Amino acid sequence: MHDFSDSSDFRDLNFKLLVVEKLMYGDRTLAPAFRLREHMRARGVEDLDAHVEAHDLEYTVLDEARAYFEALEIPAALLATVEELAFDGGHQVYMECAPVWDGEDDLFDVRSLADLDLVPNLRLFTGGQALEFMLPGALETLSARGIATRH
């Protein structure tokens, strides 16, 4: 039996990654911080960039990172602390997922705002113009929920 009062399941991994960026790499309240290079070194991969290139993984989220972030449970009390989110191609969480990603594709585009209910105190979304491009109607959805946007 899953207790949804203690943690929440996200439907859009890319939206979850925005929340992880805020809590794990920004606020540092979601710990320990995931470090892909350390994770892969523990699995015998010393040169992560060479591994990525040798296996043609430049434009994908590595399976190890995807599995970690999909399984990561974020307590509802911690989700309630999220008042701001930002979409920015330079997020640390993206480098932990795809270490040689160049930001030139839609790998981390948010596909759904169905997870907004998981961050009940969200008041500001930075990168609204990019979000609207990824998800037409997103700005209207945010506005209807009282969430301001900054481009």
Image (spheres, rainbow, N blue to C red):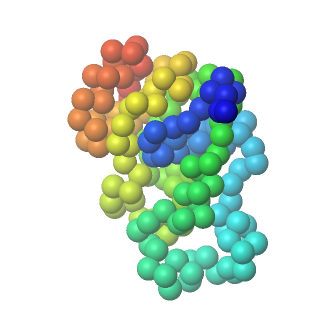
Percent position of residue 73, x then y:
66, 40
Percent position of residue 149, x then y:
38, 26
- Find the residue positioned furthest to the left: 136
Percent position of residue 7, x then y:
65, 31
Residue at figure coordinates x 58%, y 43% from the top left: 21
Residue at figure coordinates x 65%, y 64% from the top left: 36
Q: Quadrant of residue 34?
A: bottom right
* Foreground of the two, 90 or 144: 144
One can see residue 30 in this view = yes
Residue at figure coordinates x 26%, y 41% from the top left: 133
- Is 126 positioned to the left or the right of 105 in the image? right
| Image quadrant where one finds the C terminus | top left
Residue 88 against residue 124 in the figure, above or below: below
- Is 47 positioned to the left or the right of 143 in the image? right
Percent position of residue 59, x then y:
41, 68
Q: Quadrant of residue 136?
A: top left
- Is 112 positioned to the left or the right of 3 in the image? left
Residue at figure coordinates x 40%, y 20% from the top left: 148
* Foreground of the two, 70 or 135: 70
| Image quadrant where one finds the N terminus | top right
Count of numbered circles on the image: 0
